[in-house]
Image: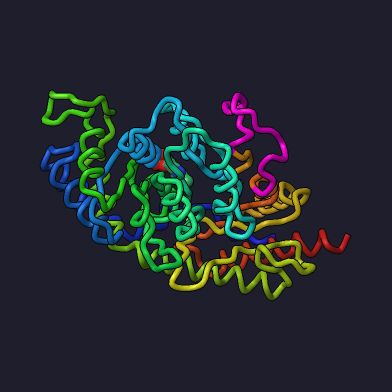
Amino acid sequence: MSDVKVPLLDLKAQYAVIRDEVHAAINEVVESQYFVLGPTVADFEHSIAEYGEVKHAIGCASGSDAILLALLALGIGHGDEVIVPSYSFFATAGYVQRTGAKPVFADIDPVTYNVDPASIRDAAARCTSLKAIMPVHLYGQAADMDAILEIGSTLGVPVIEDAAQAIGTRDSQGARVGTRGAIGCFSFFPSKNLGGYGDGGMVTTQDDGLAEKLKTIRVHGGKPKYYHKVVGVNSRLDALQAAVLKVKLAHLDNWSASRHRNAQYYDRAFAEAGARPTGATHDVSLGVRTPQPADAPATHIYNQYVIRVAPELRDPLRAYLQERHIGTEIYYPVPLHLQECFADLGYGDGDLPQSEAAARETIALPIYPELAERQLQHVADTVIEFSEARAAV
Ligand SMILES: *Cc1c(COP(=O)(O)O)cnc(C)c1O
């Protein structure tokens, strides 16, 4: 058995390259003794606005809080409804519920795993108090923004983009995610493509009025300080995170390019072994379906590289890879509409079949930028070896 080890993510490999830059940046903050918001955060917000090609970027405490701030800035609360995909990280729906509003779940497209505009239309038809639509740019690929923005404008509701996994991604118009919706929400959780050394997040908007609201809400709603027309929350980005993130932002495009190269390596290896892209209808000789990125100008930053196998093979494949020192993860094992905490909303098995199938059939492989070729080869060979052995029985 090979002795090559491939963790799902190896942040130490990245740290080894940027160690000196990061230490200098952290040191500067410590010397300044200015820790929350302040000049380092303002400078980083400016850099993100520039990188993201958006007018305003406003730091906050996490990607989840970015969603909360967006909902609050749009006045969403008790009795309101927000359409979200059922196949996402919990925060997408959790904070909708937390504001007192109701998540209304839409199904996904089985090829891109992004929310299906047709399912948004169906969900909207069932709503009585719809206040926003929140697509997620899942795994690093943009949702169908043209269709979603059109639905939003027809219904007269804003679109909030959960871009936590997709910083820098371009949609089918070549626009950066987080620029065309009313508000974009980003996460700097360590496992995201631009990850800090702790929690952090950002909201983006082109709208001056919304930007002012977001900035006020993140400091308890005080404007000026100690005078409150509204009740906000405490959700600020700290200077240590901003300093680390500013260093890492300069490397982000290179890292995204490496992730892309790694994805191409897998695509090619699996295709040669007989795999088909997700969405292919013909018979497959290898029971593996690979991701299918959209055509340029759309881009994919591969926060995750997710393959799909028959449901009865998914967990055995995961165990097989684990035994051979290959880390994997299931994003996500339970679609949101079937989470226990949402039982009151009345959804059941079979209501959103594509989300349910994805939850049973997908598995994320290591894709981080620093993967060496022998690691990529070990992953590809092991997946192919497993699939061929299964196909033979
Ligand atoms: C990571 C993530 C979030 C939440 O970000 P945190 O910074 O961890 O709070 C929200 N939505 C999606 C789709 C995510 O992947």
Q: Quadrant of residue 377?
A: bottom right
Q: Which residue is depicted at the point 23% across and 51% down?
A: 56
- Do we see residue 258 in this rendering? no
Start-end of magenta stretch? 336-354
Does residue 85 lie above or below 270 as drawn? above
Residue 139's place in the image compared with 290, above or below, is above
Q: Residue furthest right?
A: 393
Quadrant containing the N terminus in the rendered view: bottom right
**x and y percentages locating residue 221 in the rendered image:** 22, 29
Q: Is residue 245 found left or right of 352 in the rendered image?
A: left
Residue at the spot 41% in from the left edge and 44% down from the top edge: 157
Q: Is residue 352 magenta?
A: yes
Q: Is residue 354 left or right of residue 120?
A: right
Locate ligand 1 by image quadrant. Answer: top left
Q: What residue is drawn where x is 39% and y is 28%?
A: 77
Protein image colouring: rainbow
Image location (x, y in percent) of residue 271: 67, 73
User: Total marks drawn?
Assistant: 0
Residue 275, position as x, y percentages in the image: 71, 68
- Front in this rendered view, residue 130 or 97: 130
The reply to whether residue 384 is in sight is yes
Coordinates of residue 190 in the picture (x, y in percent) = 40, 46
* Residue 271 inside the magenta-drawn segment: no
Q: Quadrant of the C terminus?
A: bottom right
Name the residue: 61% across, 40% down: 335
